[in-house]
């Protein structure tokens, strides 16, 4: 099936997944970080204190996700998505009306649980289960909703923040979820997709790993070292972007341009990687998730010229594009689809945990006088280490799948 025919045949399900990932932006770090200055000022919080609030709320959402994520294995995607969107809208309303640090923490918890967690988890689990031989393309297209949010929303939010109170914008987010996201997903997910006849691979080919078996597999945790690193590093960069730009002496508008470049690069890379996944398998690409990210972190650390932000964001887009396609498909390939929701809930919880630890740890280090620029050197080195660890994983998974 060529790419155009694939899109035409599966438009409704791909559009539904794209809607979920696009609107997950309201709970993503880059979006919340736009309001960081106003929030810290209104609640008199330091970088480390706000980072701690963010970390605690996100950690609690990660723990919750482990228990509720498996609902996608038992309830239709349409109903799960509808329930999540309704709760998500309430989360935006709580953020818009928070008057204390406790309410702020609750808002962060709900935004991270619904936005970063369940919206993405539901979309990617559906794509992993509904598509077989074209899984890479489905995951890449659905995942590009994240990049559309990262590329478009900064151009809307940054100008509005200059003229409107940030609370009004959160009320707008709540309305957008009810008036746009909810009806769209209910329309697109009116029925679950079944793998079509030409998708000759059996949907449950090979051993179907339970969640207990997966967490007992040491190679699962080795894979997680690579797939969780972008969450820690990317979230830290977005969360502390204001501090970083001020330290470098760079204009904030440069980050908006950088986001757009990264988003375009990510979408193109994800689509190309998705087609490659369908040909060579996702697990073979695991080492390439973090290597461009290592170069991006290093270039941000050493650069003194503002123009160097663009190559760094391009490299982050390359890494994120490979990550989007591989992360969405590798778990189905390696561990099967029967218990995919339960398995992915653990992975997504780990992803949320890493994105929680990033702002908290790096914010605390900033408060201790260790600027973010210096921290980026260590992040770069860790990415090289994580990439090298994936080389034996590729050999082990190849042997397992050939034996099944």
Image: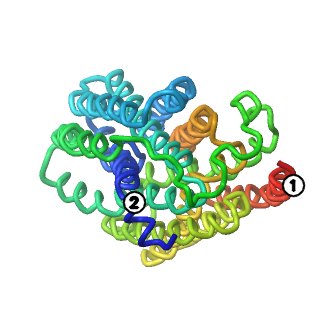
**Residue nearer the viewer, 322 or 109:** 322
* Mark 1 / mark 2, whichever is N-terminal: 2
The reply to whether discs 1 and 2 touch (Cβ–Cβ < 8 Å) is: no
Q: Residue furthest front?
A: 197
Q: Position of residue 277 (x, y in %)?
A: 63, 64
**Vertically, is 105 above or below 120?**
above
**Residue nearer the viewer, 362 or 354:** 354
In the picture provided, is 100 more to the left or to the right than 50?
left
**Residue nearer the viewer, 20 or 204:** 204
Q: Position of residue 293 (x, y in %)?
A: 60, 64
User: Mark 1 = which residue?
Assistant: 399
- The image quadrant of residue 289 is bottom right
* Mark 1, other Cα within 10 Å: few <14 / some 14–19 / many ≥20: few
Disc number for residue 178: none
In the picture provided, is 340 more to the left or to the right than 24?
right
Instruction: Report how many numbered discs are placed on residues in the image.
Output: 2
Q: Secondary structure at mark 2?
A: helix
Q: Secondary structure at mark 1?
A: helix
Is residue 193 in sight in this rendering? yes
Is residue 375 in sight in this rendering? no
Q: Position of residue 123 (x, y in %)?
A: 45, 45
Residue at screen point 64% across, 51% down: 227
User: Mark 2 = which residue?
Assistant: 246
Residue at screen point 62% across, 34% down: 346
**Vertically, is 327 above or below 101?**
below
* Mark 2, other Cα within 10 Å: few <14 / some 14–19 / many ≥20: few
């Amino acid at each position: 099936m060529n790419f155009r025919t694939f899109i035409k045949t599966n438009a409704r399900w791909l559009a539904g997944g794209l809607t979920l990932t696009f609107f997950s932006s309201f709970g993503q770090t880059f979006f919340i970080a736009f309001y960081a200055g106003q929030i810290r000022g209104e609640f008199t919080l330091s970088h480390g204190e706000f980072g701690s609030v963010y970390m605690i709320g996100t950690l609690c959402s990660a723990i919750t996700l482990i228990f509720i994520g498996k609902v996608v294995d038992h309830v239709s995607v349409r109903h799960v998505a509808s329930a999540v969107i309704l709760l998500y809208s309430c989360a935006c309303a709580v953020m818009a009306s928070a008057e204390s640090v406790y309410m702020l923490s609750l808002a962060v918890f709900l935004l991270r649980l619904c936005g970063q967690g369940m919206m993405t988890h539901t979309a990617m689990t559906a794509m992993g289960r509904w598509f077989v031989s074209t899984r890479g393309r489905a995951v890449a297209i659905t995942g590009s909703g994240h990049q559309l949010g990262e590329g478009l929303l900064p151009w809307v939010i940054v100008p509005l923040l200059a003229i409107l109170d940030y609370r009004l914008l959160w009320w707008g987010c709540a309305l957008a979820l009810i008036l746009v996201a909810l009806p769209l997903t209910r329309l697109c997910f009116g029925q679950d997709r079944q793998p079509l006849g030409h998708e000759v691979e059996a949907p449950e080919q090979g051993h179907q790993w339970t969640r207990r078996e997966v967490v007992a597999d040491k190679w699962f945790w080795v894979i997680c070292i690579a797939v969780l690193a972008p969450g820690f590093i990317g979230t830290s960069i977005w969360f502390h972007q204001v501090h970083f730009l001020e330290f470098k002496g760079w204009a904030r508008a440069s980050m908006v341009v950088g986001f757009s470049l990264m988003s375009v690069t990510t979408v193109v890379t994800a689509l190309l990687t998705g087609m490659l996944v369908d040909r060579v398998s996702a697990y073979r690409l695991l080492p390439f998730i973090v290597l461009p990210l290592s170069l991006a972190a290093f270039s941000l650390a050493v650069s003194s010229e503002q123009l160097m932000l663009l190559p760094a964001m391009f490299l982050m887009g390359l890494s994120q594009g490979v990550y989007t396609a591989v992360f969405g498909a590798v778990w189905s390939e390696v561990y099967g689809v029967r218990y995919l929701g339960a398995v992915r809930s653990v992975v997504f919880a780990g992803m949320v945990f890493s994105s929680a630890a990033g702002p908290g740890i790096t914010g605390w280090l900033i408060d201790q006088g260790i600027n973010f620029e210096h921290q980026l050197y260590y992040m770069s080195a860790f990415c090289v280490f994580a990439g090298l660890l994936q080389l034996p994983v590729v050999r082990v998974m190849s042997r397992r799948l050939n034996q099944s």
